[in-house]
């Protein structure tokens, strides 16, 4: 049982509010970034993550124990995001250029600039992909989910996820090459 599941169990069964606080602290940032990959708006992603945690805190749903706690939590968040998209029928996006830039003091400015330009290119290219491709790439490469975990979150078979990853990478490569970047260097 991973830390999130034990923290949630403590909260759910024993009323230990610290358990819920641990879950929020440990999973908030990753969940927000994942939801951002779905809805395309950081503020909406933050609201949806908050809604996800409020659901955990008020309704206290049961984890069916079919996988890791993080997979279950991200599935709840994904469902919240899809409900939001169905209701709103619009995709607002925040520009990657307006996102805060974090540069380590130890790195040279030139190296940091080149790396940030590559990140911007990848994020820009990912925005042009279909939402399903963005989701699968985000889960696999940014959140480091296994194919099985990503399949559980996206409610697809492992084979479907493997196919999606292959097609999404191919599409991303094509998009990056159209923008003048060599895929292998990113």
Image (tube, grey):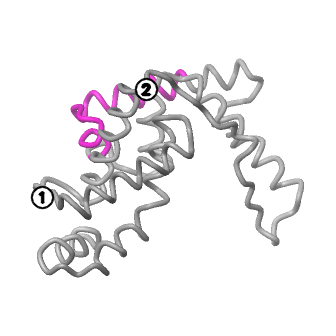
Query: Depth-wise, is mark 2 or mark 1 nearer the camera?
Result: 2
Depth check, front residue: 33 or 21? 21
Residue 96: where, in percent of width, then height? 69, 40
> Horizontal placement of 91 versus 52: left or right?
right
Total label count? Answer: 2
Q: Which residues are magenta?
A: 149-171
Residue at the image point whose x is 48% and y is 35% from the top = 39
Quarter of image, res 186: top right
Badge 2 element: helix
Depth check, front residue: 122 or 64? 64
User: Quick check: is 157 in the magenta stretch?
Assistant: yes
Predominant secondary structure in magenta? helix
Residue at the image point whose x is 41% and y is 35% from the top = 136
Q: Which residue is mark 2?
A: 88
Q: Is residue 140 above or below residue 59?
A: above
> Horizontal placement of 8 versus 45: left or right?
left
Quarter of image, res 178: top right
Question: Quadrant location of the N terminus?
Answer: bottom left
Residue 172: where, in percent of width, then height? 57, 26
Residue 82: where, in percent of width, then height? 35, 32
Q: Is residue 64 above or below residue 114?
A: below
Which mark is first along the chain, 1 or 2? 1
Rounded to the nearest angstrom, the CA distance separating label 2 from label 1 is 28 Å
Depth check, front residue: 168 or 54? 54
Quarter of image, res 2: bottom left
Q: Is residue 62 above or below residue 12?
A: above
Badge 1 element: loop
User: Quick check: is 122 in the magenta stretch?
Assistant: no
Residue at the image point whose x is 33% and y is 50% from the top = 74
Residue 62's disc is: 1
Depth check, front residue: 151 or 173? 151
Counting other residues with Cα less than 10 Å from the Cα at mark 2, is it few (<14), some (14-19), or many (20 or more)? few
């Amino acid at each position: 049982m991973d830390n999130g599941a034990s923290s949630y169990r403590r909260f759910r069964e024993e009323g230990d509010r610290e358990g819920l606080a641990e879950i929020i602290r440990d999973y908030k940032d990753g969940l927000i970034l994942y939801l951002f990959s779905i809805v395309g708006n950081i503020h909406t992603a933050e609201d949806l993550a908050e809604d996800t945690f409020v659901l955990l805190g008020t309704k206290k749903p049961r984890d069916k124990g079919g996988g890791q706690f993080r997979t279950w939590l991200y599935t709840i968040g994904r469902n919240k995001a899809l409900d939001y998209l169905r209701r709103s029928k619009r995709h607002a996006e925040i520009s990657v250029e307006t996102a805060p830039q974090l540069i380590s003091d130890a790195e040279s400015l030139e190296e940091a600039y080149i790396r940030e330009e590559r990140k911007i290119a990848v994020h820009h290219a990912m925005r042009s992909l279909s939402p399903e491709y963005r989701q699968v790439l985000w889960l696999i490469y940014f959140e480091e989910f296994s194919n099985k975990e990503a399949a559980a979150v996206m409610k697809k078979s492992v084979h479907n996820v493997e196919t999606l990853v292959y097609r999404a990478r191919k599409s991303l490569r094509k998009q990056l090459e159209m923008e003048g970047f060599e895929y292998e260097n990113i």
